[in-house]
Image (spheres, rainbow, N blue to C red):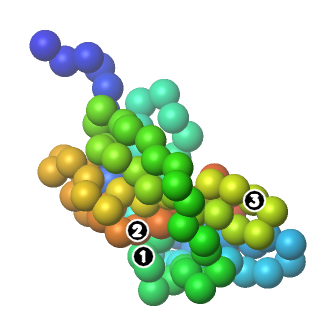
Amino acid sequence: MSTGHRITIEQGTEHVRVVRDGQIIAESRSPLVLRETGSPVRYYLPPEDVRTELLTPSDSSTHCPFKGDASYWSLPGAPDVVWAYPTPKAEVAQVKDHFCFYDTEVVAA
């Protein structure tokens, strides 16, 4: 029996970026767009579009019954603002090793 919970993932063409303290942390024109029942739209960015040298691995982790276990990273003065699923569940395998930020902005065309 379905719980009514859905997750869809599409290859996006939106131009998205993450800026913190005037510095571009990530910028992508090929994010994965994840829509999940009861949650805001999230953009998962490929690692090559993220300045991973600015991220510090965190000890935090969370478990999602639908996506799996998430690992977190921090930015200076901003703990746990980035997460990824290193070993996601099969239904959301596309997001593997893509980074998601709380404060991603869509850049107007």
3 vs 2, front mark: 3
Q: Amino acid at mark 1?
A: Pro
Residue labelled with disc 2: 98
SS under mark 1: loop
| Residue at the image point whose x is 42% and y is 76% from the top | 46
SS under mark 3: strand
Q: Are marks 2 and 1 in contact (CB under 8 Å)?
A: yes
Q: Of the numbered discs in the image, which one, if any, rests on residue 78?
A: 3
- How far across and how far down the image is residue 38, in percent? 48, 28
- Of pointers 3 and 1, the one earlier in the residue sequence: 1
3 vs 1, front mark: 3
76 is higher (above) or lower (below) than 10: below
- How far across and how far down the image is residue 59, in percent? 52, 55
Q: Quadrant of residue 68?
A: top left
Rate crowding at label 2 as few (under 14), some (14 to 19) or many (20 or more) other CA atoms within 10 Å. Answer: many
- How far across and how far down the image is residue 88, in percent? 26, 53
Distance (Cα) linking label 2 and label 1: 5 Å
Q: Of the numbered discs in the image, which one, if any, rests on residue 69?
A: none
Residue labelled with disc 1: 46
96 vs 49, left or right, is left
* Farthest front residue in view: 59
5 is higher (above) or lower (below) than 53: above
Distance (Cα) linking label 3 and label 2: 19 Å
Distance (Cα) linking label 3 and label 1: 21 Å
| Residue at the image point whose x is 19% and y is 18% from the top | 2
52 is higher (above) or lower (below) than 81: below
Q: Amino acid at mark 2?
A: His
- Of pointers 2 and 1, the one earlier in the residue sequence: 1
